Image (spheres, rainbow, N blue to C red):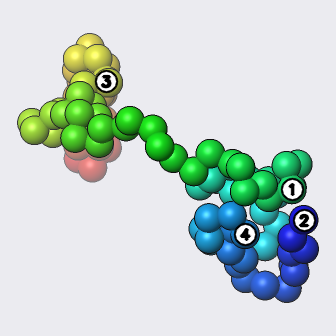
Amino acid sequence: MTSIDPDDDYIACPHCGAELGPTATFCSECGSSDADGWSTEADVGGDDFDYEDYVAANFSDSGVNRETPALWRWVAVVLLILFLFACLAIWR
C-alpha cells in the first residue's frame, strides 16, 4: 500500500499516474483504491466507447437542449416577459 503525505498538494496514482487529491482514497481514472491496495489489476480501460456516436446522440448542431421539454422553455419565456413588465411598471 502506498502512503499518502497530506502535506502534498496532489499525488499521483501509483497504478495509472493520474493526479489525485492529497486525501484521495481511490483513483477516479482507473479505480484503484485503499481498499484494494492500489492494485495493479484495476480496470484501466479497454471498453468499446465511441465518442463520436456519443456526441452525435447527445448534442445537436442546433444548440437546442433536447433534454428540456418545450413546455418548460415556453414557461420560462412567459415568466421572463412577466418579470420585464413588472420591472417596467415599477420604474414608471
- The mark nearer the N terminus, 2 or 1, is 2
| SS at circle 4 | loop
Vertically, is 56 above or below 11?
A: above
- Residue, far top: 71
Q: Position of residue 5 (x, y in %)?
A: 87, 80
Instruction: Report whether 34 appears left or right of 66.
Output: right
Residue found 62% across the figure and 53% down from its top: 30
Task: Please give the residue where the numbered disc 3 appears in the rendered image.
Answer: 68
- The mark nearer the N terminus, 4 or 3, is 4
Kind of residue at disc 1: Gly
Task: Please give the residue where the numbered disc 4 appears in the rendered image.
Answer: 14
Task: Please give the residue where the numbered disc 1 appears in the rendered image.
Answer: 37
| SS at circle 1 | loop
Kind of residue at disc 3: Thr
Which label number is shown at residue 63?
none
Task: Please give the residue where the numbered disc 2 appears in the rendered image.
Answer: 1
Q: Are marks 2 and 1 in contact (CB under 8 Å)?
A: yes
- Residue, far front: 41
Q: Report the number of discs.
A: 4
For residue 12, say whether it is visible: yes
Q: CA distance from mark 4 to mark 2?
A: 9 Å
Choose mark 1 or mark 3, whichever is in front: 1
**Label 2 crowding class (10 Å Cα cut-off): few <14, some 14-19, many 20+?**
few
| SS at circle 2 | loop
Q: Position of residue 60 (x, y in %)?
A: 15, 34
